[in-house]
Image: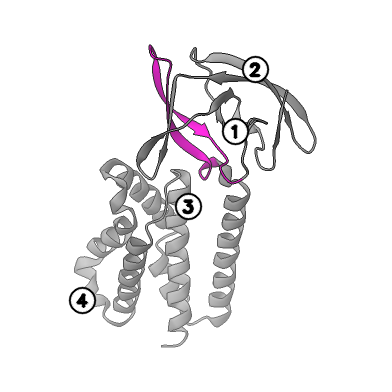
Amino acid sequence: MRYLEIIILINLAIHLSFIMVANYIFKQKKNRLMIFLSCILDIIYILMYVYIPYILEPYRFVFIFIISILPFVTKGLIKALMLLLVYLLLNFTLGGSAGILYKIINNFYVVLISLFIILLIISICSLYKKTHSYNSSFIYPVFISDGIHSFYLDGYCDTGNFLTTDENIPIVFLNRKISIGRYKRNIIVTTVSTKKEIMLYEVKEFKIKIKNKYVKRDVYIAYADISHMVMFGLNILGG
């Protein structure tokens, strides 16, 4: 059949874009192996849909469920079901990628335009993710304690840009103000366009979760609304 290879590529692009959107919404890391297996099943589904639809029809929804859930099976039951729901909502809202592609399979220009649109959407999403990567790449689960109270929170720590004081002690930004820690001193945060004074706090115990393990570190804590601050390229100066 004409353009079958292009049809498969477009379907895979749609499939991968749905997976990417679902993972981005819930800030989940991709499981490449499960996504690869899902893509293989997706290709098999398309070939069966085109050549032997009468055999596929009784098992169609089983195939769709397996293809949809497979990229998310390692996320835990609740997260996997939520990610699956987002994927299915996207797929069913668009009418089902396989059904749409089967209708346009003999229109070469529509196929090319569809491929271009899908690639454009993926490129825009990838660019957006790069420019907003601080939402996931630099946020770590942290544990802080003063010996009496303890908290599990999310902390911003740009390990690549070495956000430290002039004493070379790392700074972790928390976007929730809590009554814990001993005031240490103020520092000046200098960016390209602004300069802001913030307070640093010292706690008795601080642990950061790296590779599923909580590791003890000596750090200073600062409180800031990290969702509205551009942390990249900051120069942390002692004050």
Q: Are marks 4 and 3 in contact (CB under 8 Å)?
A: no
Could you give the CA–CA distance between mark 3 and mark 1, rounded to whole angstroms? Answer: 20 Å
Residue at the spot 35% in from the left edge and 40% down from the top edge: 213
Give the residues drawn in magenta, as a range.
135-160
Please rate how many residues cluster around mark 4, counting C-alpha atoms within 10 Å: few if below 14, some from 14 to 19, many from 20. Answer: few
Q: CA distance from mark 1 to mark 2?
A: 24 Å
Residue 115: image x %, image y %? 55, 72
- Calculate the distance from the C-alpha at mark 4 to the C-alpha at mark 1: 51 Å
Horizontal placement of 49 versus 159: left or right? left
Determine the CA span between mark 2 and mark 4. 72 Å
Name the residue tied to disc 4. 55
Q: Residue at x 62, y 37 (%)?
A: 163
Observer-nearest of 27 and 178: 178
The residue that mark 1 highlights is: 227
The tag earlier along the polypeptide, 4 or 3, is 3
Give coordinates of residue 209: x percent, y percent: 40, 37
Instruction: Give the alpha-carbon distance from disc 4 to disc 3, as whole Å.
Output: 32 Å
- The image quadrant of residue 41 is bottom left
